[in-house]
Image (cartoon, grey):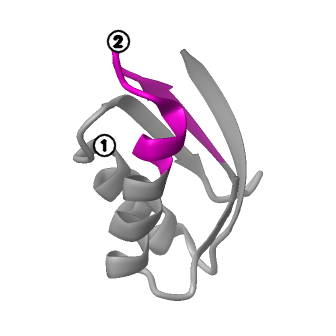
Amino acid sequence: MKKTYKIEVDCANCANLMENAARKTEGVQNATVNFMTQKMIVEFAEGFEAGAVMDAVCKACKKVEPDCEIFL
């Protein structure tokens, strides 16, 4: 399942760091962060609940970019 989330990130490098952090999160099959559109697309792995995975994604992204916002 794929879902798109609105994000708020300050620079393209920060968006790249957030993308890498999201991809490493358990339950994420793939993730793409687009700085220009301020959107994050997350593809969830089979058997994982999207809400719990996104909580972990938010925590991982906050570690690499404390100013970022992901609107769930």
Residue visible at 51% across and 33% down?
50
Q: Position of residue 21 (x, y in %)?
A: 30, 57
Residue 52 lies within the magenta run: yes
Give the residue drawn at x 31%, y 43%.
23
Q: Nearer the viewer, residue 17 or 59?
A: 59
Asked if the residue under mark 2 is in contact with the one under mark 1, i.e. CB atoms within 8 Å, the reply is no
Residue name at image x 56 percent, y 87 percent: 67
Q: Is residue 30 left or right of residue 43?
A: left
Mark 2: which secondary structure?
loop
Up-down relation of residue 55 to residue 29 (above or below): below
- Which residue is located at x 42 percent, y 77 percent? 62
Residue 11: x, y in percent? 58, 76
Residues packed near mark 1 inside 10 Å, few (<14), some (14 to 19) or many (20 plus): some
Count of numbered marks: 2
**Closer to the camera in the image, 4 or 56:** 56
Q: Quadrant of residue 64?
A: bottom left
> SS class of the residue under badge 1?
helix
- Mark 1 to mark 2 CA distance (whole Å): 15 Å
Residue 46 marker? 2
User: Does 9 sit above or below residue 25?
Assistant: below
Mark 1 or mark 2, earlier in chain: 1
User: Would you identify the image quadrant in which residue 65 lies?
Assistant: bottom left
Q: Which mark is residue 31?
A: none
For residue 3, side relative to residue 46 (left or right): right
What residue would you read off at disc 1?
23
Q: As shown in the figure, which amino acid type bears the numbered disc 2?
A: Glu
Mark nearest the camera among 1 and 2 is 2
- Report the span colored magenta: 40-54
Q: Nearer the viewer, residue 66 or 12?
A: 66
The quadrant holding residue 53 is: top left
Is 69 above or below relative to 16? below
